[in-house]
Amino acid sequence: MTPPPSSAPRRIDLHTHSTASDGTLTPAELVRAAAEAGLDVVAITDHDTTAGWEPALRALPPGLTLVRGAEISCLWNGVRPGVSLHLLAYLFDPDFPALAAELARVRAAREIRGQRIVELLRADGVELDWTEIHTAAAGGSIGRPHIAAALIRAGLVATTTEAFGPQWLGWRYRVPKPDIDVFRAVELVRAAGGVPVFAHPRASRRGRIVPDELIVELAEAGLAGLEADHEDHSPAEREHVRALAGRLGLVVTGSSDFHGTHKTVRLGAHVTSPQAYERIVAQAGGVSPVVSD
Ligand code: AMP
Ligand code: ZN
Ligand code: FE
Ligand code: FE
């Protein structure tokens, strides 16, 4: 038998969701699943919350490194109406007051928006129950996937993808929420010692995307990286993002954006290179990656 190479390639997945937001595995189940999937590094990046950090840390299997993060709901206000975009934030201080306050504000807005969507559905005779949806979310940051799951339970749609179609949450029952201005979010994440990476910047099938000129401005404002390898990017879009990152000196990441059974993508379906990961860790000053032994 040959021994394993001393520098075995590390498998690094920097974007996953748990029941702290719209994933279907608890934070503890998520880190166990990450170890079982053969990952060496996993980031927990729930929408607008750090509530999954503690339970993920407590359950961390030996040898797996946990990167604590979040996916922040942002808005680019350079056009009307603004374009919604997602900013991954890694290793920031969760108690940094201005950032914690903004995340709490967005979580509260998610509750109001969710309730409003259910009201609109009910006004059209779709008998969903907000209390039931809220209970099913079990304290997690409420998102449209929770409403999609209720539509599936009611037998009105077959899949999450169908629930995000134009007849449902994608357009007809789309209600905006007051997300954080993306420049302010970049500034706050940096001020909190975190490292901001633009999630799936070319995912046009989810909605409108932003122009490259905005990404240039964000890089000047402190953006650290771009997520290139993501299931919602075509090969050409991945290449475009990679080239743009190269021009701007930004870190390139790849990640699964795992959501449990809310999506079909598996943990580790896309990964980040060890070099890119090290560049992120080198810029972080809020909290550290944690590995248990
Ligand atoms: P929200 O943050 O409540 O607006 O919901 C956004 C979340 O819904 C994303 O993070 C995805 O998990 C999911 N999502 C968005 N677009 C789609 C889509 N077209 N198909 C399936 N899930 C989607
Ligand atoms: Zn999500
Ligand atoms: Fe996202
Ligand atoms: Fe995500």
Image (cartoon, rainbow, N blue to C red):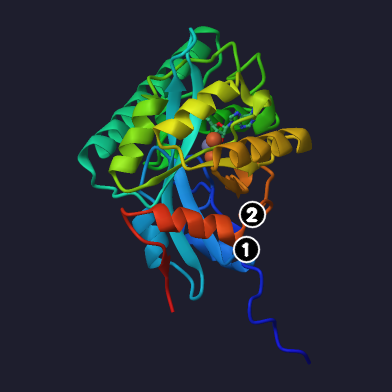
Residue at (27, 39) in percent of width and height: 100
Q: Position of residue 17 (x, y in %)?
A: 51, 46
The residue nearer to you, when weighing 227 against 215, is 215
Q: Are the residues tagged 1 and 2 within 8 Å (C-beta)?
A: yes
All told, the count of numbered labels is 2
* Position of 196 relative to 62 (above/below): above
Which residue is located at x 47 percent, y 34 percent? 219
User: At x 70% / y 38%, what residue is drawn?
Assistant: 238
Label 1 or label 2, whichever comes before in sequence order = 1
Q: Which amino acid, mark 1?
A: Arg
Mark 1 nearby-residue class (10 Å; few <14, some 14–19, many ≥20): some
Indicate the quadrant where residue 247 lies.
top right
**Residue 133 visible (yes or no):** no
Residue 140 visible in this rendered orientation of the protein = yes
Residue 82 percent across, percent down from the top left = 47, 14
Residue beneath label 1, please? Answer: 11
User: 217 or 181: which is nearer to us?
Assistant: 217
Residue drawn where x is 45% and y is 16% of the image: 176
Identity, as a three-letter code, of the amino acid under mark 2: Val
Q: Which of 256 and 120 is in front in this view?
A: 256
Which image quarter holds the N terminus? bottom right
Query: Residue 108 sits in which quadrant?
Result: top left
In the picture of the structure, the residue carrying the numbered disc 2 is 271
Left-right relation of 283 to 5:
left
Alpha carbon separation for disc pair 1 and 2: 6 Å
Element marked by disc 1? loop
